[in-house]
Image (tube, grey):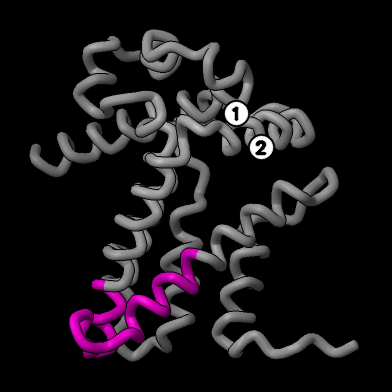
Amino acid sequence: MTGLRERKKAETRAALGWAAIHLTAERGYDNVRVEDIAEAAGVSPRTFNNYFSSKAEAIASRHLDRSLRTAAALRERPADEPLWAALTSAALEQFTRGPEVEAMPSPAHAQWVTGVRTMLAEPALQGERLRAVATAEAELAAAVAERTGTDLATDMYPRLVAAAASAAVAVAMQHYLDSADPPPPIERLITDAFTQVAAGLPVPPR
């Protein structure tokens, strides 16, 4: 029962976070109310307030939750798997389309990109986005430290890896938004980004 309850809570949180993103990209940040997000997710405004303190937090939650799941997945990868192969697999697991996306699919790529760019430029979101990134990188660094036997207090390595992995995902997602329609699969972009980082970012041949 505990497992079922936690899964239901995670599904509700994901539905609210996705609804917040979807509606904001569609209507603009100032034109979306908490009540709208709750209705789109099929819950009450009171339920929304049980999960988030603001719509900005709800929007930022998708990146945060995906990153926290990446850290959890990394801890479950085989111990003898090379670090960057494990990181790549752990990150890719989090980009499977969930039921919340199936229930509220994105519009055409060009329309979606325009809405998402406007949303990401919203000043009211910046603080929550920074907090989400910091929390996510700290948790991923802890997972990397456990896997590599390094010490967060004395070694830079786990935080460097976490920051590089976070940047790789961010660049892959930005490249996805910048691509012409149809964009390359996000899974391919993430894999390529991680591969380049793992190789030490060699200069491409001219």
> Percent x, y for residue 108?
75, 30
180 vs 136, left or right, is right
Viewer-proximal residue, 202 or 19? 202
Residue ID at (42%, 39%): 60
Q: Nearer the viewer, mark 1 or mark 2?
A: 2
Q: CA distance from mark 1 to mark 2?
A: 18 Å
Which x, y percent locates residue 19? 47, 24
- Crowding at mark 2 (Cα within 10 Å: few <14, some 14-19, many 20+): some
Question: The N terminus appears in which quarter of the rendering?
Answer: top left
Residue on which the image places disc 2: 117
Residue 143 is a magenta residue: yes
Residue 7 position in % (x across, y down): 24, 39
Closest to the observer, 126 or 152? 126
Can residue 15 be seen in the rendering of this structure? no
Q: Residue 36: which numbered mark, if any? A: none
In the image, what residue occupies the spot 71% across and 47% down?
Answer: 177
Q: Position of residue 12 (x, y in %)?
A: 31, 28
Q: Residue furthest front?
A: 123
Residue type (three-letter) at the residue carrying disc 1:
Pro
- The residue depicted at 71 percent of the width and 37 percent of the height is 113
**What number is the disc on residue 105?**
1
User: In the image, what residue occupies the spot 63% across and 35% down?
Assistant: 116
Q: Which residues are magenta?
A: 142-166
